[in-house]
Image (cartoon, rainbow, N blue to C red):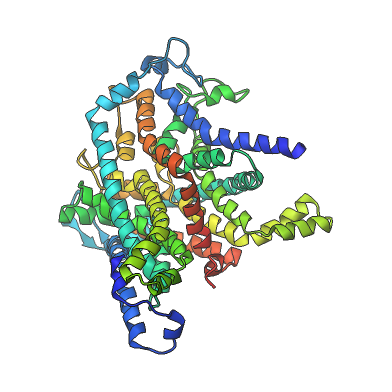
Amino acid sequence: MTTQTDTPVKDRRAAKPVESDRSRAEARLGQKLVAPAIVLMLVVTAFPMLRALYLSLFNYSLTAPDDREFIWFGNYAVALTDPLLWKTTGITVLYMVVTVAFELVIGFAFAMVMHRVIFARGVIRTSILVPYGIITVVSGFAWQFAFSYQNGFVNSWIPGLAADFNWFGETTPAVVAIMVSEIWKTTPFMSLLLLAGLAQVSEDMIEAAKVDGATWTQRLTRVILPNMRAAIMVAVLFRALDAYRIFDNIFVMTAGAQNTESISFLTYRQTIEQFQIGIGSALSVLLFLSVLVIAFLIVKIFRVDLADARQEK
Amino acid sequence: MKQKIGMVVGVALILAWCLLPVAWIISLSFKSQTAITNGSPGFFPADGAGAGWQNYQDVWDNEQFRRAILNSIGISLIATTLSVIIATLAAYAIARLEFRGKKLVLTMALVIAMFPVVSLVGPLFDMWRAIGLYDTWPGLIIPYMSFTLPLAIWTLSAFFREIPWEMEQAAQVDGATSWQAFRRVIVPLAAPGVFTAAILTFFFAWNDFVFGISLTSTEAARPIPASLSFFVGADPFNRPASLLAAGAVISTIPIIVIILIFQRKIVAGLTSGAVKG
């Protein structure tokens, strides 16, 4: 922070067109200040990612490090032809689509309430941060125990369900339980982002629509939602990519049993538990690529410029 | 009137949604171990089946757990401090100075924010073992810093853009030295933003699980989420639910305290970083 006093304060707009000494000094200072952040981000992400790319071309297991062998794209061929990869990708996409859809609807309802409510604002805001702040592992435990037939309460709260129904004995109920814990944990984040979006919709426009005789549904779909498109898109993008990486909940609640394994979990299992660095690296690269594809698709579907959404223009 | 009732119902639903699982885990942490293994489903401890503070006592007496809490506090605080310092420099440059590559920094931060953490765990595991960072504090602090930087940079540059930097000049015109102008005018305006970024960064580090289980192997550096997930009691086939619940509650206390004190700042930071940017 103190470095900034080294350079005199100057008028940015005046300095811009001419390459003066001042603007060059400013550019140098700027680059110096962002350098540590860039270096650190490169060291921990770009470099390991390149290394993963390199290692993915080898048949390499930590249990037999001397047998390391260059096999071109052999690992990718193995991974891509294995039905297990497609099964885990399918379940991961399912987690992502279902949780984000529920979060969007519930989060929006919460945001509407928080936007209009006039009492207990502090209490609501504090409460809504509780799921956001809690460790994902802890929320995983809370829900696992809640769904457990040995010590949970869910079975007795759902009418018509046997007291000894085992949620973690089959794929579908286990997936539902995992989704519930994910939705519980992240809906508040979604609702806060949507609340910020709601606050940007002009009250005058809503009032004008009301005067013109628009019904509540019309005001929602014709005025409020279109004007929040940028905020919705940012919320969906962030949450979808986050949900696609789902790992903690699954690890705690089922440890991947009953076909609940996500693609992150498969990658973790291959690399860390089974020491298959080669194939694990190939999976890491595929996981990264699929995240890029999803990000690209969401941006395309919503047709919103990110810079625009962040009011940079 | 009808609208008012709707509001009350809405508020009640939100509160129930947010607090029910927390009430449940607290309730579980006061149940006795035997009551749980005997199978006594119910929200609150049954009469005579409560354990009082025993579970908390047992968890706290557990060496592994105490180490994990200390690891988490130390690692998260160090990572937060360093990350926020570096992010403040970068965000100041982005908000205030003109230089090439500004867009690149923001794009890079965005890409890293979306990065699937598991993708990096394999190569980092391999690298850290080669250079001796595996199972050490720096071995977790470095990845935490890198992954919290994007969030901190976005949040801080959003805050810094709102600061009327001209006031610094005005103070100088009024006779303050540039250091005085900076310290008296800019620091008080920037401090709340820096503080908010620090809280969000701390949450992130405290919540991490993937790095915690992958880059550690002993109590030397294992943080609390990882430690909880590996916690097996006397019977390896039955998780000690009430003990774990007590551990979960303890690990949540710092988060709740921070939320209670700083809720306004956290909400502002979360939304400004993501929506206003």
Residue B230: name its quadrant.
top left
Percent position of residue B107, x then y? 42, 68
Name the quadrant of the C terminus of chain A: bottom right
Percent position of residue A156, x then y? 56, 21
Name the quadrant of the N terminus of chain A: bottom left
Percent position of residue A167, x then y? 50, 30
Percent position of residue B27, x then y? 45, 23
Is residue A298 depicted above or below B264 in this figure? below
* Residue at the (45%, 59%) spot, across then down: A291
Tag count in the figure? 0
Is residue B6 depicted above or below B137 in this figure? above
Residue at the far right in the pictured view: A213
* Residue at the (42%, 67%) spot, across then down: B106
* Residue at the (33%, 46%) spot, across then down: A269
**Going by the image, does B271 lie left or right of B77?**
right
Q: Nearer the viewer, residue A215 or A290?
A: A215
* Residue at the (45%, 22%) spot, across then down: A151
**Observer able to see residue B58:** yes
**Going by the image, does A181 lie left or right of B56?**
right
